[in-house]
Amino acid sequence: MTATPVRLKYEVKDLALAPMGKQRIEWAGREMPVLAQIRDRFAKEQPFAGIKISACCHVTTETAHLAIALKAGGADAILIASNPLSTQDDVAASLVADYGIPVYAVKGEDNDTYHRHVQIALDHRPNIIIDDGCDVVATLVQQRKHQLPDLIGTTEETTTGIVRLRAMLRDGALTFPAINVNDAETKHFFDNRYGTGQSTLDGIIRATNILLAGKTIVVAGYGWCGKGTSMRARGMGANVIVTEINPVAAIEAVMDGFQVMPMDEAAKRGDIFVTVTGNKGVIRGEHFDSMKDGAIVCNSGHFDIEIDLEALKGRASEVKTVRTFTEEYKLKSGKSVIVLGEGRLVNLAAAEGHPSAVMDMSFANQAMGAEYLVKNKGKLEPGVYSIPVEADQEIARLKLQAMGFTIDALNADQIQYVNSWTSGT
Ligand code: NAD
Ligand code: SAH
C-alpha cells in the first residue's frame, strides 16, 4: 500500500534563518506607516474573520507586512512566491516561525516547484486571492472551476496581471470581481515609477558592481516602469536610449530629453539593456548579433520572456556564472553577452525589490482592496474594478501625513468656482 503524501505545513529553505528575517521585517516596518495603521484597524475590526486568503506575491520584507496585516484582520492566510527567484529565504522562515503564517517559497525554486506552490495556494480553497501576475487566478479558472463558488474575488498587483484579467473578461472567463490594485494612483505612480526606477538600478549594481556613469543604457518601454528607470539611470550619469512601439510614449521620451530609436539600432549602441514593456521577445536573436562584446541585458518587466533567452542559448558555445545572478554567454561569434537574474525581474532577483516606502502604498491598496471585496460580497458583478477614488486619496493623505507634509485645502469660494461654469474671462 502506498502512503498518502503528507502535505507540508510550509516549505521554506531553512527555519534557522528566521531571526535575520524578523530583524529585516521589523526594519522595513519603519517605512510602512500606512499599512501599519490599516493593520491596527484590521486587528480591531476583524474584517477577514472566517475568510481564507491565498496570497501570491514576492516573499519580501514588505510582503511580510501585508501578510501580517491580513492575519491581524482574522484571515486564514497563506503565502506563495510570485516569482521563482524573488523569495527572501530569511523572511519566509520568519513568517512561519515568528508570525505563524504558512509560506511556500524558496529562492531559486524550479518551475515545477513554483507551479506546485500555485496548486497549494488553490488547495487552501481561498475566498480571496491576492495575485501578482495572475498565475493563481489563471490556474484556478483553467484547472479548478469547481472551486469558483468558494471565491469572493481577487486583487491584482501588477500591470501584466491586469492585462491578463482584461483578456479573461473579454473571453468570458472572468466570472468574479477582480480589484485592479495596479491602476490606483498611489500604486503605479510610485511603485512602478520610483520603485522600479531605483530597485532596477540597485539590481544591476548588486549583480555587476559596474559604474553606470558614462554608460549607454537602453530602456525598452517608456511606460511607468520605463519612465522611472530612464530617469534614475540619467541621474546616475548614464546616457539613456529609449525604445517604444507607442508613438505617444515615444514623444514623451523625446520631450523628456532621451534618444529614441528602434531596438535594431539601439542594440548596436547599448552597454546595458533593461526591458520593461510587459511584452515578449523584445530583445531577440538579431539584436544579440549586433550588440557590443560584453553587453549586459536584464529585465525588470514581465516574467522571463522579454528577452529571448532561447535565441541567446542557440548562439552560445558556453554559459558560465561569473558573479551571483550574472551569467556570461560566450557566443559562437566570439563575443559575449551578460544576462542578469536569468532574465527574470532583476530588481527582485539580484536586489530586494522596491523599497518599503513605496510598497507601503501598494500594499495598503491590496489590503483595502481585499477588505472591499469581503464587505461587498455577493454585490459585485464579474469585472475588473478600480480601487475606489476615496481609498486612493485616503492612502495618499495618510502617507503624506506620515512623511510630515501638509497641503492646502480648497476654501468655500474655490469650491464654488470649480463647480460653476457661468464666470469666464
Ligand atoms: P506600461 O503599460 O505603463 O508600459 C509599458 C510600455 O511598454 C508601453 O508604453 C508600451 O507601449 C511599451 N511596449 C510594449 N511593447 C513594446 C516593445 N516591443 N518595445 C518597446 N516598447 C514596448 O506598463 P508598466 O506599468 O511600465 O509595466 C511594465 C512591466 O513591468 C509589466 O510587465 C509590469 O507587470 C512590470 N512591473 C514590474 C515591476 C518590478 O518590480 N520590476 C514593477 C511594476 C511593474
Ligand atoms: N509576478 C510576475 C509579474 C511582475 S511582478 C513576475 O515576477 O514576473 C511586479 C510587481 O512586483 C510590481 O507590481 C510590484 O508591486 C511588486 N514588487 C516590487 N518590489 C516588491 C517588494 N519589495 N515586495 C513585494 N512586491 C514587490
Image (cartoon, helix red, strand yellow):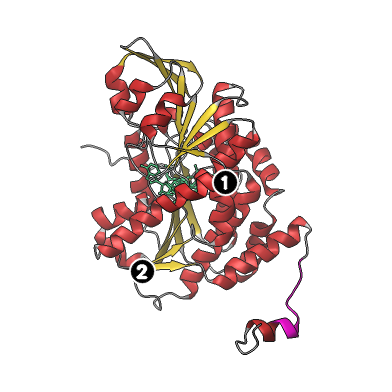
Instruction: Using a 10 Å C-alpha cutoff, classify the residue at mark 1 as few (fewer than 14 neighbours), some (14 to 19) or many (20 or more).
Output: few
Image quadrant where residue 314 sits = top left
First of labels 2, 1 by sequence position: 1
Q: How many marks?
A: 2
Residue 130's x, y, as percent? 45, 56
Residue at image position (47%, 54%) is: 157
**Residues rendered magenta in the picture:** 407-414
In the depicted structure, whether residue 241 falls above or below residue 51: above
Residue 64's x, y, as percent? 58, 47
Residue 189's x, y, as percent? 57, 55
The mark closer to the camera, 2 or 1, is: 1
Q: Nearer the viewer, residue 380 or 196?
A: 196
- Any part of residue 312 in sight: yes
Q: Secondary structure at mark 1?
A: loop
Q: Which mark is residue 383?
A: 2
Q: Secondary structure at mark 2?
A: strand
Looking at the figure, which quarter contains the C terminus? bottom right
How far apart marks 2 and 1 lie (CA) works out to: 36 Å
Q: Nearer the viewer, residue 347 or 231?
A: 231
Q: Which mark is residue 256?
A: 1
Residue at image position (56%, 25%) is: 215
Pick out the residue farthest to the bottom: 422
Amino acid at circle 2: Gly
In the image: residue 184, left or right of residue 319: right
Instruction: Using a 10 Å C-alpha cutoff, classify the residue at mark 2 as few (fewer than 14 neighbours), some (14 to 19) or many (20 or more).
Output: many
Residue 187's x, y, as percent? 55, 56
